[in-house]
Amino acid sequence: MFIIHVTVGNLILERSTFWNLKEASNYAREAANNKIWEFGDNQIYYGDVQAFVYKPKLCVTSDHIDEHILSFSPSKRNRRNVMRSARG
């Protein structure tokens, strides 16, 4: 089982569970690129989020916090700074 947390700072905007890593990582990547998050009562968040993929140890009962195994953030690439080939 894999758990996805979509976060802004310490606030969890969304939590989802998946049974395989491929589906979990695809969903996390898509969620990290989403800029608009709508909540109940006409509340909207617009901005960058991070998505973390966790694989909890289900056989062990403990009070520790599981470390994330993957994280996704939106691309910060500036298209004006792309290198171009020199012309003649």
Image: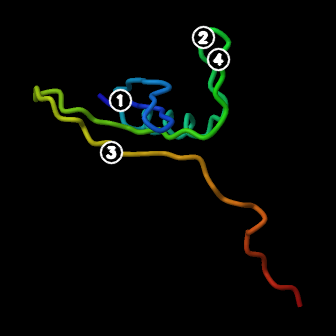
Secondary structure beneath label 1: strand
Tell me, yes or no, whether the two marked residues, 2 and 1, touch with CB atoms within 8 Å.
Answer: no
Question: Which numbered mark, 2 or 3, is in the foreground of this view?
Answer: 2
Q: Earlier in the sequence, mark 2 or mark 3?
A: 2
Residue 23 lies in quadrant: top left
The structure residue drawn at horizontal position 45% and vertical position 28%, both measured from the top left corner, is: 12
The structure residue drawn at horizontal position 43% and vertical position 45%, both measured from the top left corner, is: 71
Q: Position of residue 66 (x, y in %)?
A: 24, 37
Can you identify the residue that label 2 sits on? 40
Q: Is residue 87 above or below residue 64?
A: below
Can you identify the residue that label 1 sits on? 3
Label drawn at residue 43: 4
Question: Which numbered mark, 4 or 3, is in the foreground of this view?
Answer: 4
Q: Residues within 10 Å of mark 1 (few under 14, many from 20)?
A: some
Q: Residues within 10 Å of mark 3 (few under 14, many from 20)?
A: few
The structure residue drawn at horizontal position 24% and vertical position 32%, both measured from the top left corner, is: 56
Q: Residues within 10 Å of mark 4 (few under 14, many from 20)?
A: few
Measure the alpha-carbon separation of dots 4 and 3: 31 Å
Q: Position of residue 86 (x, y in %)?
A: 82, 85
Measure the alpha-carbon separation of dots 2 and 3: 30 Å
Split into 4 quadrants, where in the image is the N terminus? top left
Can you identify the residue that label 3 sits on? 69
Secondary structure beneath label 3: strand
Measure the alpha-carbon separation of dots 2 and 1: 23 Å
Q: Amino acid at mark 2?
A: Gly
Split into 4 quadrants, where in the image is the C terminus? bottom right
Q: Amino acid at mark 4?
A: Gln
